Image (cartoon, rainbow, N blue to C red):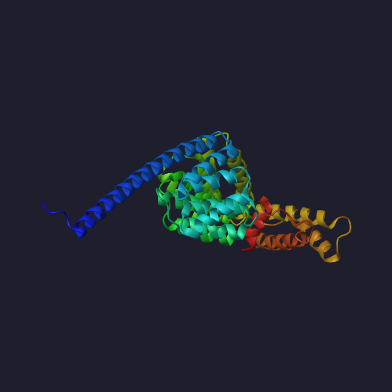
């Protein structure tokens, strides 16, 4: 039998070498995969320990456990986002900002990372920058429940603006929600309260009416609707709503206070429709008496000549000898006099409270 040629022997040997290399490579891949699997299992175990520590409020320990987890699985964004939240909760805002900056550099659309960064910046008092990150969270990407999380981020921004009394910015954030109000009536009621705070009572009233359609026995919604109508000088409607709120919730002290104010206004305002001539005249006299007392108290014991003349005229007006035929004209004169006295009172320091019944009636008359 002929011996194999040198070329054939070389090819056989080369094949064996390649087979050995392939076997070694496969073994390495298997071991590497096994190691990665074990690393993921260990990382998950450490991460769960970190989550448990967060739930117990032990944020420093949580940071250690989650840091260990990320050392095994650096690319896991969930771990690093949770690490930033633990760092923030522990007061380590600098560390949290560094963690989040790294995350957002690789994905600037990360909604949760943006929201956490906004909270870090609020904690540091950097409100302008925080608003920008809140917007990123509102329009960013979320792995689950995107609509609910985006709405939560917007409401968190809204609460920040409301707390800082940034009314123009607050309205800009409220309007997109008004166009597509949340289905949850509790959130719509909250939105109504925010519109009241921002100074849009008509929008607030529409939201509260929608709430009452879904929750007709909700005392807070009636109270909110009453406040919205009161702000629009719809005092009779507001009175009815406050009364309903108190019937549903007798201990509602805010509704009680607002009802008392509405009642006082409704007995004082001479411009209400449906008043008879005699009642309108009587109320005009009362207004002169009240504004005269305010102006006299403001001037003290030595009023200026012009004010003294007004006070003398007021004294005559509150002791009227007016026939029924002249009551209508006298009422108009009294309202003009009350406005002049009120204008004189407004020069005092401090000025009269803008939400007192007299101030509200005089503002209504001036319209």
Q: Is residue 338 above or below residue 88?
A: below
| Total marks in image | 0
Q: Residue at x 37, y 43 (%)?
A: 31
In the picture, measured across the screen, residue 30 lies left or right of residue 327, that is: left
Q: In this rendered view, identify the residue nearer to me: 37 or 239.
A: 37
Nearer the observer, 81 or 174: 81
Image position of 216 with respect to 146: above or below: above
Where in the figure is residue 124, as x and y percent of width and height?
A: 65, 53
Q: Residue furthest right?
A: 302
Q: Residue 243 appears at what percent x and percent y?
A: 53, 40
Image quadrant of residue 32? Answer: top left
Residue projecting furthest to the bottom: 306
Residue 361 coordinates in the image, percent (x, y): 64, 55
Q: Is residue 111 left or right of residue 365?
A: left
Residue 42 position within the rendered picture, expressed as x and y whole percent measured from the top left: 45, 38
Q: Quadrant of the C terminus?
A: bottom right
Residue 229 visible? The answer is no
- The answer to whether residue 304 shows anywhere in this view is yes
Q: Residue at x 66, y 50 (%)?
A: 357
Residue in the foreground of this view, choosing between 317 and 86 = 86
* Residue 1 in the figure: left or right of residue 195: left
């Amino acid at each position: 039998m002929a011996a194999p040629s040198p070329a054939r022997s070389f090819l056989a040997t080369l094949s064996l070498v390649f087979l050995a290399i392939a076997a070694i490579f496969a073994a390495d891949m298997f071991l590497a995969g096994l190691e990665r699997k074990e690393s993921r299992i260990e990382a998950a175990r450490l991460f769960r320990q970190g989550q448990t520590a967060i739930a117990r409020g032990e944020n420093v320990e949580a940071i250690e456990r989650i840091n260990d987890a990320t050392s095994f699985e650096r690319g896991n964004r969930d771990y690093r986002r949770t690490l930033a939240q633990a760092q923030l909760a522990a007061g380590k805002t600098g560390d949290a900002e560094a963690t989040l900056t790294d995350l957002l550099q690789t994905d600037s659309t990360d909604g949760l990372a943006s929201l956490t960064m906004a909270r870090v910046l609020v904690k540091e008092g950097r409100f302008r920058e925080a608003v920008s990150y809140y917007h990123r969270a509102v329009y960013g990407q979320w792995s689950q429940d995107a609509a609910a999380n985006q709405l939560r981020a917007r409401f968190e921004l809204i609460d920040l603006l409301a707390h800082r009394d940034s009314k123009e910015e607050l309205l800009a954030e409220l309007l997109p929600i008004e166009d597509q109000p949340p289905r949850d009536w509790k959130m719509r009621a909250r939105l109504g309260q925010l519109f009241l705070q921002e100074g849009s009572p008509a929008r607030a009233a529409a939201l509260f009416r929608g709430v009452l359609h879904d929750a007709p026995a909700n005392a807070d919604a009636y109270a909110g609707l009453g406040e919205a109508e009161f702000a629009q000088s719809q005092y009779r409607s507001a009175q009815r709503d406050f009364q309903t709120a108190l019937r549903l919730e007798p201990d509602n002290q805010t509704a009680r206070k607002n009802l008392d104010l509405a009642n006082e206004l409704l007995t004082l305002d001479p411009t209400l429709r449906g008043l008879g001539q005699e009642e309108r005249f009587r109320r005009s006299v009362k207004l002169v008496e009240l504004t005269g007392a305010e102006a006299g108290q403001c001037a003290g014991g030595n009023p200026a000549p012009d004010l003294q003349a007004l006070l003398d005229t007021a004294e005559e007006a509150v002791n009227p000898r007016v026939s029924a035929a002249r009551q209508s004209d006298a009422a108009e004169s009294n309202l003009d006099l009350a406005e002049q006295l009120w204008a004189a009172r407004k020069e005092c320091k401090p000025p009269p409270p803008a939400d007192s019944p007299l101030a509200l009636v005089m503002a209504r008359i001036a319209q």
